[in-house]
Amino acid sequence: MKAYKLKDNIYWVGAIDWNLRNFHGYITPRGSTYNAYLLIDEKVTLIDNVKYYLFDEMLARISDIIDPHKIDIIVQNHIEMDHSSGLPQLMKIIPEAKIYTNASAIKGLKLHYHQDWNFQEIKSGDSINIGKNDLTFLTTPMVHWPDNQVTYCPQEKLLFSNDAFGQHIASNERVESDFPLDIVLEEAKKYYANIVLPYSKQVQKVMEAVSSLEINMIAPSHGLIWTEHLPEILNAYNLWSNNITDNQKALVIYDTMWKSTEIIAYAIAQAFENKGIKAKLQNLQLTHISDIMTEVMDAKYICVGSPTINSSILPTVAAFMSYLQCLAPKDRIGLAFGSYGWSGQSVPMLHKMLGDDSGCGFKMLEPVKVQFIPDEEILNQIRENLERQLDNM
Ligand code: FEO
């Protein structure tokens, strides 16, 4: 296991999780990495950490450069267990090492591992000198947990950004310039949609803080390291955190029982197309909710359909709505649709979930509700009615 040299005396020493396919409900078909960074300076410093079952891999990569016993300082930018569960094994090797992190992280680490390690509490804006280099800490609460922080090395213009700017990609390549950029950006978008989206306001604060720093490399805690395409990822984070959507993009998300709701979904998609708006159909039986969330990131129109079943909506649609409400995209236009047999609760339920402030708070189009199977006349009415509303927007 080899370390990867990023700059003079700065190495990637993380671990590659080739087999990760699910990250708390978010599917990760490309796997992931847990990135840790070793700074060889007067004080040998390790920034971030790995998941417990890949600890030996990190240790081997550190040993490729230096005896791990020589590590003086650990900077723990985040306590979520993908970045901290290797820490107990590391602390058995270097029990005297100082762990620099913020008060929220110290509290959280104690509640996770119940150890009284040598914690050194930092506050946002604090700096330490490790020899030739300084490290400045900026707390970034809720990007993605209350304890998140980033670490900046001004001499190297290097930002260790932890969860921000990450992507779930396992690869032999370490920097984004050695990997297809469209895939890195797509995975960064999926990561933002499924991990960071509810905290967009906090991301804007991070972007503000970052804009005052000179940066030529961003080293996140997952995936590829940004070396050449910083403007692209910073621009994308600006768009995503400001809820900038494409007025010409609609999503028609649904599940169906006897195909009536699917027939309505196609009629809705046709109406959008007739008005020059690209509509993507997303069948919840076939498309995972975490992939749909990636599409939600830039879609202006979010249409959700379910037939009525047992006075409610289908479980797949309920799961999606719960996920959508929690990830909380803003400033979208919603539409509820579906078929029913006799009672017809699904569409009003979806209309409320999408439109109410206690739900998604979207501006709503008129709901579409059809008893049993729509004929061509009903489908024409659905298309004409939606097209008329789109004309008036
Ligand atoms: Fe990659 Fe919030 O942990």
Image (cartoon, helix red, strand yellow):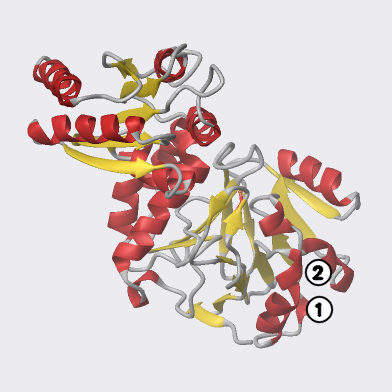
Q: Is residue 136 left or right of residue 349?
A: right
* Tag 2 near tag 1, CB within 8 Å: no
Amino acid at pointer 2: Leu
Q: Which residue is mark 2?
A: 90
How packed is label 1: few (under 14 Cα within 10 Å), some, or many (20 or more)?
some
**Which quadrant is the C terminus positioned in?**
top left
Please tell me the numbered disc located at residue 290.
none
Q: Who is closer to the viewer here, 154 or 354?
A: 354
Q: Is residue 389 above or below residue 53?
A: above
Disc 1 is placed on an element classified as helix
Q: Is residue 112 left or right of residue 30?
A: right
Disc 2 is placed on an element classified as helix
Q: Position of residue 328 (x, y in %)?
A: 46, 29
Q: Position of residue 268 (x, y in %)?
A: 22, 29
Which numbered disc flags the more N-terminal residue, 2 or 1? 1
**Residue at the location (34% across, 58% down)?**
185
**Residue at the location (48% across, 66% down)?**
30
How packed is label 2: few (under 14 Cα within 10 Å), some, or many (20 or more)?
many
Q: Position of residue 58 (x, y in %)?
A: 68, 75
Q: Which residue is mark 1?
A: 69
Q: In which quadrant of the rendered view does residue 123 lie?
A: top right
Q: Position of residue 47 (x, y in %)?
A: 64, 63
Q: Nearer the viewer, mark 2 or mark 1?
A: 2
**Residue at the location (64% across, 87% down)?**
1
Q: Is residue 131 left or right of residue 393?
A: right
- Regarding residue 7, the answer to whether it shows in the image is no
Q: Is residue 155 above or below residue 335?
A: below
